[in-house]
Image (cartoon, coloured by chain):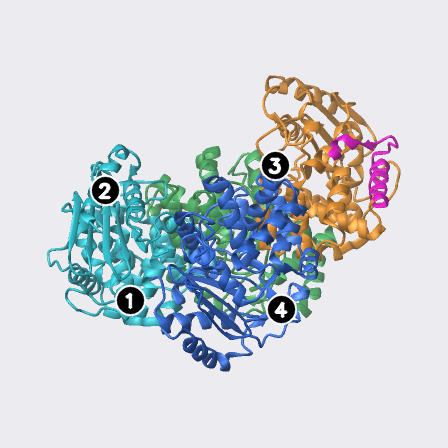
Chain colours: A blue, B cyan, C green, D orange
Amino acid sequence: MDYQAVLEEIYKEIQPHFGEGKVADYIPALSSIDPRQFGFSIITQDGSTYNVGDTQTDFSIQSISKLFTFTLALDIYSRDLYTRLGVEPSGNPFNSLVQLEYEQGKPRNPFINAGAIVVTDSLIAHYQDDYKAFEVILNFIRDVADDNTISFDPEVSSSEMEHAHRNLALANLMKSFNNLDNEPNQAVQTYFKHCAISMNTQKLSRAMLYLANGGTDPLSNKKYLTPQQTRRINAVMLTCGHYDASGEFAFHVGLPGKSGVGGGIVAVVPGKMGISVWSPALNHYGNSHLGTLALQKFVEKTGLSIF
Amino acid sequence: MDYQAVLEEIYKEIQPHFGEGKVADYIPALSSIDPRQFGFSIITQDGSTYNVGDTQTDFSIQSISKLFTFTLALDIYSRDLYTRLGVEPSGNPFNSLVQLEYEQGKPRNPFINAGAIVVTDSLIAHYQDDYKAFEVILNFIRDVADDNTISFDPEVSSSEMEHAHRNLALANLMKSFNNLDNEPNQAVQTYFKHCAISMNTQKLSRAMLYLANGGTDPLSNKKYLTPQQTRRINAVMLTCGHYDASGEFAFHVGLPGKSGVGGGIVAVVPGKMGISVWSPALNHYGNSHLGTLALQKFVEKTGLSIF
Amino acid sequence: MDYQAVLEEIYKEIQPHFGEGKVADYIPALSSIDPRQFGFSIITQDGSTYNVGDTQTDFSIQSISKLFTFTLALDIYSRDLYTRLGVEPSGNPFNSLVQLEYEQGKPRNPFINAGAIVVTDSLIAHYQDDYKAFEVILNFIRDVADDNTISFDPEVSSSEMEHAHRNLALANLMKSFNNLDNEPNQAVQTYFKHCAISMNTQKLSRAMLYLANGGTDPLSNKKYLTPQQTRRINAVMLTCGHYDASGEFAFHVGLPGKSGVGGGIVAVVPGKMGISVWSPALNHYGNSHLGTLALQKFVEKTGLSIF
Amino acid sequence: MDYQAVLEEIYKEIQPHFGEGKVADYIPALSSIDPRQFGFSIITQDGSTYNVGDTQTDFSIQSISKLFTFTLALDIYSRDLYTRLGVEPSGNPFNSLVQLEYEQGKPRNPFINAGAIVVTDSLIAHYQDDYKAFEVILNFIRDVADDNTISFDPEVSSSEMEHAHRNLALANLMKSFNNLDNEPNQAVQTYFKHCAISMNTQKLSRAMLYLANGGTDPLSNKKYLTPQQTRRINAVMLTCGHYDASGEFAFHVGLPGKSGVGGGIVAVVPGKMGISVWSPALNHYGNSHLGTLALQKFVEKTGLSIF
């Protein structure tokens, strides 16, 4: 299939939709971004790369980073991780305290904020230092993206820390249920740092290849996870990757994917390719409006849904 | 792959687990069933059939019937159906009123009880008669299963009607939000009738073929749904098919599936086969204990996960 | 104190507020009432009566009837009644299903709809017949109001029954938790009948005297309850008598009271008097707007708060 | 009435109940207290004092302090305080986050933890310094109790601060809704300091006199609040003073009262007297078991219920 032609067709078709959606405004450092940007990258298992639009512009990956921390924690703790968090969709907005209290401090899954904070906390506990833990996270992302220049934006993470009260509420609540090993402030700060990592769609699509290939990077041959673990991460992406719109995403796109409020989305076609799309304006669920639309078109044109 | 050998291997491996789990006891007519039964059937798109265990014993399909009513309603109402119900996982037990009240009478998805009652109500409204609607449902199931002898067990549906107060509460609540066209009693009664349809795993696996083949039965060539509609039904099965354990099922099995409290489970390998397994004892989520275990083994042995 | 002068002063002061608030519109038979009506009656323990405004106009007492059914049930079942319902404020709108489900079908108090339906159900169970139970309720009200002409308006109760789906949802939910002895329909129908009883403020203030006098009518010397039971009913009125505005009412008025959506309010000054006020337009909590204002003024002018 | 005889009678009657209930164990510094202690003090408006049992033993007043901070904040902010918190019973356990999230960071009343933290925050904001605010609180309590030796136990407040994660979750959640002016840590720390103030029942009953006498201390003639404000504080005590058992307390005791997990309870008979009782073992609602029982007996014997 001529993927380059497909991407260009999609790029043309979404033009009338520029201007729809709304950039996330609760993080000052992100709110001033130009919404009229769009990039779409795919990379197949043999390394063939296809790009259209602003695929070389870095943006804040935000919650997409939860995928990488989850991978690391799963590799370290294996099934023991699930004593601290679940793999069920939340059925509630991504930062809800209600469910967390009802379920006694055990987050529903690793992709809601509470779950991602627990995952980060587990990495700090393992490496016995928050700076060391962050370094490991950053190096892992550089490794799977095959790009040693990737870094984080301290202005973004500081800006988030100033508006962190709800996440601190989540972390303190989990601490009160003994589901946090480190200080709430420390876990939340490290969490914001990995959310503030900057990448572009080409790097992100590259970073998905190990998940498209059973846990082993098909280009570097590095093995990160077992095939079973990989299938399970993909399953959690599908059921929980888009907060309270995960069902909608599965319904309309039908690929394991993960979104971030910076406007990025990553997705995986198991056995075939890594995908990333980016456009800063969000729909009312907090997922990239044009990104979701473009992925839907991609699946319609290629038939690459897992269903 | 020698599917018959795989099924027999699984059958052997699950033997030590007989006796685990618990038969549903809230429906008197179902509570007396012998829990030590197990059947596993698959049928590939070319019609090859593989059976192991009690695959010829009829049982109450219960919530599996929601898959067929959803198919019919989707065919009639297309996207308009989604003004009345969603496609998001519920994150709550299958018969919870809380979420239904919070979301003003609009059920989260077609597979929780409230959603299935709305679907049934929509069919009664379309056929302007509850008996006619039920006849259409039954005939559709006979058609996709290619078996004209399939019927329902009036003793089971009557027994359920006597313990229907929670479902009547759901139906009355939706009626108070103007999301029910017919009388609550009528919708619930018809719902129980299609839940009380009796089938065995061989018939059920056969009935899944249209969902494994883009909406068209590969053996009869009858077209029931478009490929897009079919992918979407499969996506809803994956995200919502096992109530509050849908995430677990996606995580461990990784196939679109739907369970019933009678102990049956159906699943689909898109492009490949229809599957059904049955064993009456349930795990604490209300899904067949041995059935879930067997499907997990099947995917591990065959690698047929969609992830 | 010259109570007549106080009432007339209040009557003058509230004039500018006519037109504020909104008549209940969910019961068709009640929605057409002229909102510009107002009556205020008090009767002291020696039988002295003071009236101002429309005190001879009958209106639908609605939830005020819950006070009389609670009295009857308490007399019959004594403390056993509290196995089926509590005496805590609900902290939620009066017809919420959420709390009822969370607390497994046991209503928080006798004055929210669910609690009143349980109370009515307990009376039907005791008299083994719904018509007989209703007759007992009506006769009790005639007795405490010392007026044999009091009756109910069948048009109002039928009109409510047509919009009863939410109350039927509550009743079915309680039935599913085994906290209803009779059929949901029967309990709800009888409940609507006693809500549809018509009285005016003079009769209602008279009907409060037994609660102002330790359970014994000071004029007829009939004993209905023990002093302790009476104090407890008054306490429940204070903490739960105005749905989710009970705290506000205690805060601003400071008397045990009970409101109805027909615009009536009754209140008690223990050891002193029975009070009733009526005006059909409601505030956003569903309590009479002018009635609440008038009672607040009454307490400010007379210092008769219990606090 | 011979109050001394009444107290001694009660003291005798509760003896068989020593050993019931359970000392609060979530604050280490409080958990080691001897549960077999009991003191009961009353003081009438003319200054006559009646004591029985351990009335000279200081204990941690804990949540009783919320009454004094509420008085101070009401005096400073008057009705403006109610833009930040309500006066409705919560209908939920005292430290629930669910309701706080549902109601967007506005606590239901000043006596649940979230409400008391807002009140403390408002005092810090007014005095522009947390140490100054605490000094004002302590001096006010010394003033109303007429005892300059009253102080707080830093060991208790530090011990609480170490287990403060749930209260910090509440404070951070309110901060995220812009309902906290100061840093969550600062507000919570000051809150714990005033909770750690030590008093005995004689001092506490004395400190209630201004609330029993329309806001003016009848012995010193100092005016703290208007009669209307006082009636309203008493009303909030009655409807909200005992967390989720406020209805039970109104039902069984029928006096405005406030409890603390240190085992103390204060109550007011408007126009007559201040009351305090103490016994460390708590019932399952977190209120003093023997204290509640003793107050119930007191009201039964004296008829001093407000109802």
Residue corresponding to mark 3: D249
Q: Same chain for labels 4 and 2? Say yes or no.
A: no
- Badge 2 or badge 1: first in the primary sequence: 2
Q: Which chain's residue wears label 4?
A: C
Circle 3 residues within 10 Å: few <14, some 14–19, many ≥20: many
C-alpha gap between disc 2 and disc 1: 28 Å
For the record, the magenta segment spans D131-158
Quarter holding residue C236? top right
Residue C168 horizontal side relative to residue C15, left or right: left
> Can the viewer see residue B224?
yes
Residue nearest the viewer, comparing A305 with A270: A270
Q: Secondary structure at mark 2?
A: helix
Residue corresponding to mark 2: B30
Residues at circles 1 and 3 in contact by the CB criterion of under 8 Å: no
Residue under the point 44% across and 75% down = A7
C-alpha gap between disc 4 and disc 2: 58 Å
The amino acid on which the numbered mark 3 sits, given as a three-letter code, is Phe
The amino acid on which the numbered mark 1 sits, given as a three-letter code, is Ala
Q: Is residue A231 above or below residue C85?
A: below
Q: Secondary structure at mark 3?
A: helix
Disc 4 or disc 1, which is closer to the eye?
A: 1
Q: Which chain's residue wears label 2?
A: B
- Based on the picture, tell me whether residue D141 belongs to the magenta stretch: yes
